[in-house]
């Protein structure tokens, strides 16, 4: 299930590069907060404290209640880095196991 969440979030982040209505970005913020919260829970259950802290930080960054204003260009960079990081974490985890 965590891999499905990671892939789904990465796809949502990559679609943020397109010129979409503002409602989509609000949806992405909510989905990211929930997704990263679930990933943090799974990391905690697996005893991976560093991953849990990272996911909690990302959930706070993307949360929709108090919006962090970074500007469109910087948010695009953040979306790509986080999306690539999520995909990279799937493939590196599979190689380790």
Image (tube, rainbow, N blue to C red):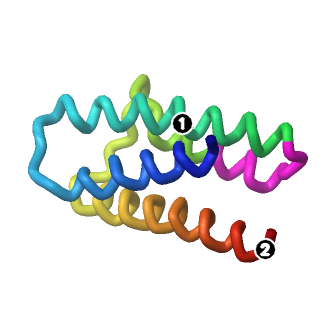
Instruction: Report the front residue among 46 and 52.
Output: 46
Give the Cα separation between the discs numbered 2 and 1.
Answer: 23 Å
The secondary structure type at the circle numbered 2 is helix
Q: Which residue is mark 1?
A: 35
Q: Looking at the figure, which quarter contains the N terminus?
A: top right
* Residue at position x 77%, y 45% in the image: 43
Would you call the spot at circle 1 few (<14 residues within 10 Å), some (14-19), or many (20 or more)? Answer: many
- Pinpoint residue 47: horizontal percent, then vertical percent: 90, 47
Instruction: Report the front residue among 21 and 6.
Output: 6
Which residue is most to the right?
47
Would you call the spot at circle 2 few (<14 residues within 10 Å), some (14-19), or many (20 or more)? Answer: few
Residue 5 belongs to magenta span: no
Instruction: Report the front residue among 56 and 8.
Output: 8
The magenta-colored residue range is 46-56
The secondary structure type at the circle numbered 1 is helix
Against 76, residue 56 (above or below) is: above
- Pinpoint residue 39: horizontal percent, then vertical percent: 65, 41
* Residue at position x 11%, y 36% in the image: 21
Q: In the rendered image, which quarter is residue 26 located in?
A: top left
Magenta span main SS: helix
- Pinpoint residue 93: horizontal percent, then vertical percent: 71, 67
Tag in front: 2 or 1: 2
Instruction: Report the front residue among 81 and 2.
Output: 2
* Residue at position x 46%, y 32% in the image: 63
- Pinpoint residue 53: horizontal percent, then vertical percent: 73, 47
* Residue at position x 40%, y 60% in the image: 78
Q: Which residue is mark 2?
A: 96
Q: Is residue 11 left or right of residue 21?
A: right
Residue 53 belongs to magenta span: yes
* Circle number at residue 85: none
């Amino acid at each position: 299930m965590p891999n499905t969440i990671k892939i789904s979030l990465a796809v949502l982040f990559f679609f943020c590069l397109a010129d979409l209505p503002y409602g989509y970005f609000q949806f992405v913020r909510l989905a990211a907060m929930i997704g990263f919260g679930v990933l943090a829970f799974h990391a905690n259950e697996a005893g991976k404290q560093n991953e849990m802290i990272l996911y909690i930080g990302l959930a706070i960054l993307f949360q929709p209640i108090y919006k962090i204003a970074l500007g469109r260009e910087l948010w695009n960079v953040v979306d790509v880095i986080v999306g690539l990081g999520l995909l990279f974490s799937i493939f590196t985890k599979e190689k380790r196991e």
